[in-house]
C-alpha cells in the first residue's frame, strides 16, 4: 500500500515504492498503479520537463549532475530519470546512476531514479511517463530525463517533455556528430559541452556551425533553437543554459497546455497498440491459429490483411 500523503510530502521511500509499483509487470500491480496515478493526477503537471540526449561520450551524466546541482543549490527540487541500458541476461540496470552522480544524489532536494529500459524500443523506459507524474506529485519542479542516445530514443523523449535539449561535443570536422535533420528539427536547445581547455575555440566554431544550420532549418518562424557552449566538468556557463531554458518556456508558454494534451493523446494511442499486442500474446485462440496464418501468408493462400483481420476477430472471442 502506497502512502499517498507521504508521497505528496516528498517522502523518498514512498516515491520509490510508487515507482516500483508502476514499473511492475504483474497484472494485479498494473491495476493498483493506475488507481494510484488517478488519485495523484490533480497533483501533477506543475514541473519543467526537460529531455536531454546526445551520443555516448558527450558527457550527459556529467552535464546532468552539474546542471542538477546548480539548480538544487538555488532552491529547485530536481528529479533525474536516468534511463539505463538493461542487462541482456537479467534485465537489470547496469550503469548505476547514483554512483555516476554522487554529488547530486547527496542533496536533500534531488532525487535520482535509474530505470532499466527493459527492452523498450528506442531506449526509453516503458514507464517513464508515469514516473514523471509521480515525481511531480512528490513536489519536484524540474525533471530531467536522460536518454541512452540511440536512434529512436530522441523521438521518444521529445514526445514526453516540454523542452528537448541535445548535447554535442566540440568538433570542427565536416560531419559534426553525424546528426540527422530529423534530430535537429526536434531540438529546442543545443549545448556544445566540453568547452574547456584547448577545446574552447573549437566549441565556438561548432556553435557557429549549428547556429547556421538552425537558421536554415527553422526559417519559418516560431522558436529559433538556441546554441550554447558550456563545460559540465568545470561547471561553467550553466547559468546560461538555465536562462535559455527559462526564455524558451516563457516564449512557448501559450502552447504548453496544448502540447502536453497532444502528447497525452499520442501516448494513449501508443498504449492501445501495446494493449492489443498484450491481448494477442495472452489469447490462446490467436496463438494457436497464428502459425497456420503465417504459413498461409508465406504460401500466398491469402493476403496479410485477411490474416491480420482474422487474428483481430479471434481476440474478441
Image (cartoon, rainbow, N blue to C red):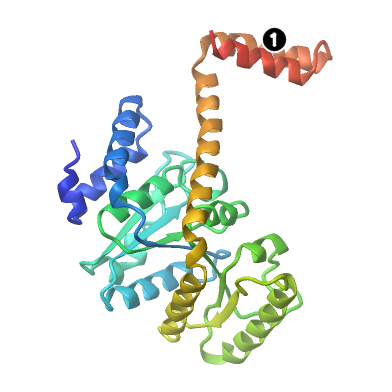
In this view, 26 is above or below 170: above
* Residue lying at 49% horizontally and 79% vertically, measured from the top left: 244
Whether residue 120 is visible, yes or no, is no
Does residue 73 appear left or right of residue 131 in this picture?
left
> In this orientation, which residue lies closer to the viewer: 240 or 284?
240
In this view, 116 is above or below 170: above
> In this orientation, which residue lies closer to the viewer: 309 or 24?
309
Residue 208: give x, y in percent of width and height: 67, 85
Does residue 107 appear left or right of residue 187 in this picture?
left
Q: Quadrant of residue 312?
A: top right
Residue 105: give x, y in percent of width and height: 27, 65
Q: Is disc 1 surrounded by few (<14), some (14 to 19) or many (20+) residues within 10 Å?
A: few
Whether residue 151 is visible, yes or no, is yes
Does residue 297 appear left or right of residue 91 in this picture?
right
> In this orientation, which residue lies closer to the viewer: 8 or 200?
8
Please state, as top left, top right, bottom left or bottom right, where the N terminus lies in the image. top left
* Residue lying at 23% horizontally and 69% vertically, measured from the top left: 107
Residue 138: give x, y in percent of width and height: 25, 54
Read off the residue under disc 1. 292
- Label 1 sits on a secondary structure element that is helix
Q: Quadrant of residue 10?
A: bottom left
Residue 200: give x, y in percent of width and height: 57, 90
Does residue 311 appear left or right of residue 90 in this picture?
right
> In this orientation, which residue lies closer to the viewer: 170 or 216?
216
Amino acid at each position: 500500500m502506497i502512502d499517498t500523503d507521504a508521497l505528496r510530502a516528498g517522502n523518498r521511500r514512498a516515491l520509490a515504492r510508487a515507482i516500483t509499483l508502476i514499473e511492475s509487470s504483474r497484472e494485479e500491480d498494473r491495476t493498483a498503479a493506475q488507481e494510484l496515478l488517478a488519485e495523484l493526477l490533480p497533483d501533477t503537471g506543475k514541473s519543467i520537463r526537460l529531455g536531454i540526449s546526445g551520443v555516448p561520450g558527450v558527457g550527459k551524466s556529467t552535464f546532468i549532475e552539474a546542471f542538477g546541482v546548480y539548480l538544487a543549490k538555488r532552491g529547485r527540487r530536481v528529479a533525474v530519470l536516468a534511463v539505463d541500458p538493461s542487462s541482456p541476461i537479467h534485465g537489470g540496470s547496469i550503469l548505476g546512476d547514483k554512483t555516476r552522480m554522487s554529488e547530486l544524489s547527496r542533496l536533500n532536494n534531488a532525487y535520482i531514479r535509474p530505470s532499466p529500459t527493459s527492452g523498450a524500443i528506442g531506449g526509453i523506459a516503458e514507464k517513464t511517463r508515469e514516473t514523471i507524474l509521480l515525481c511531480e506529485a512528490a513536489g519536484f519542479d524540474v525533471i530531467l530525463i536522460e536518454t541512452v542516445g540511440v536512434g529512436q530514443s530522441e523521438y521518444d523523449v521529445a514526445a514526453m517533455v516540454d523542452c528537448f535539449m541535445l548535447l554535442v561535443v566540440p568538433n570542427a570536422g565536416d560531419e559534426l556528430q553525424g546528426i540527422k535533420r530529423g534530430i535537429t528539427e526536434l531540438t529546442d536547445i543545443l549545448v556544445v559541452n566540453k568547452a574547456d581547455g584547448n577545446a574552447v575555440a573549437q566549441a565556438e566554431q561548432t556553435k557557429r556551425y549549428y547556429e547556421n544550420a538552425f537558421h536554415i532549418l527553422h526559417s519559418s518562424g516560431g522558436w529559433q533553437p538556441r546554441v550554447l557552449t558550456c563545460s559540465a566538468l568545470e561547471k561553467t556557463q550553466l547559468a546560461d543554459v538555465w536562462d535559455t531554458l527559462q526564455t524558451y518556456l516563457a516564449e512557448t508558454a501559450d502552447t504548453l497546455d496544448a502540447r502536453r494534451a497532444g502528447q497525452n493523446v499520442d501516448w494513449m494511442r501508443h498504449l492501445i497498440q501495446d494493449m492489443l499486442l498484450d491481448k494477442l500474446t495472452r489469447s490462446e485462440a490467436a496463438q494457436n491459429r497464428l502459425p497456420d496464418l503465417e504459413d498461409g501468408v508465406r504460401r500466398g493462400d491469402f493476403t496479410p490483411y485477411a490474416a491480420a483481420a482474422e487474428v483481430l476477430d479471434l481476440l474478441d472471442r
